[in-house]
Amino acid sequence: MNLQERVRDLESAYKKYLLKKFFKNLFYLLFIGLLIGIIFFIVQNHYKQKSISLEALNYKKELEQNIIKAKILQEKNKIIREKLIQENNHTISKIQIDSKVFNIAKLKNNFYKNPSYEKALILSREYYKMKDYNKSIFWALKANDIDKKAEDSWLIFAKAKIALGHKDEAKKALDAYLDSYGFIEFDKELKND
């Protein structure tokens, strides 16, 4: 072999060597890049999972705190309710409306939100039963303002006036009703007591 062929063979071998070295380095670079990508993905996934876990834990703690607060509030309300019932047993009587039991304070509140003859009449009757005749008269008048023709409010008004010793005022009220609307069924109100 001559020198030129030998140089060409050496150059060719050197080019192959450089090409091999290039591909080898490229392979290492790709491998390292892929490895870094996988590690990055794993770390990112780990932090994402950790973030989700932390968020879930915080949400769980918040729910537990809300449940504890609700239980505390429920206990406080129960204690206050029991205390009010003990202190004011005669004034916080329960009344039944539409198969539900409401106390007088709730019924008053409900009346002021949505006035009705029935609510005012029930309040008047309850105060009459508690022998608070002035409040009974007040609510009978409220009921009468809503429906002047309904006799129940006139009757409870008259009964409360009589209980206070104002028989003349009771008679005048009943006479005024009779003059305006006619007949009163006296037994009806007595049956409701």
Image (tube, rainbow, N blue to C red):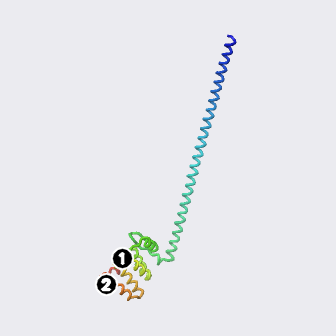
In the picture provided, is 146 more to the left or to the right than 80?
left
Q: Amino acid at mark 1?
A: Asp
At 42% across and 86% down in the image, what residue appears?
A: 164
Rendered image: mark on residue 16? none
Q: Quadrant of the C terminus?
A: bottom left
Rendered image: mark on residue 179? 2
Q: Position of residue 179 (x, y in %)?
A: 31, 84
Between 58 and 72, the residue placed more toward the observer is: 58
Q: Quadrant of residue 39?
A: top right
Q: Amino acid at mark 2?
A: Asp
How many marks are shown on the rendered structure? 2
Q: Secondary structure at mark 1?
A: loop
Rendered image: mark on residue 147? 1
Q: In the displayed image of the protein, which residue is found farthest to the right?
A: 3
Badge 1, how many Cα within 10 Å: few under 14, some, many 20+?
some
First of labels 1, 2 by sequence position:
1
3D distance between C-alphas at marks 1 and 2: 16 Å
Between 87 and 106, the residue placed more toward the observer is: 106
In the picture provided, is 73 more to the left or to the right than 156?
right
Q: Position of residue 120 (x, y in %)?
A: 40, 76
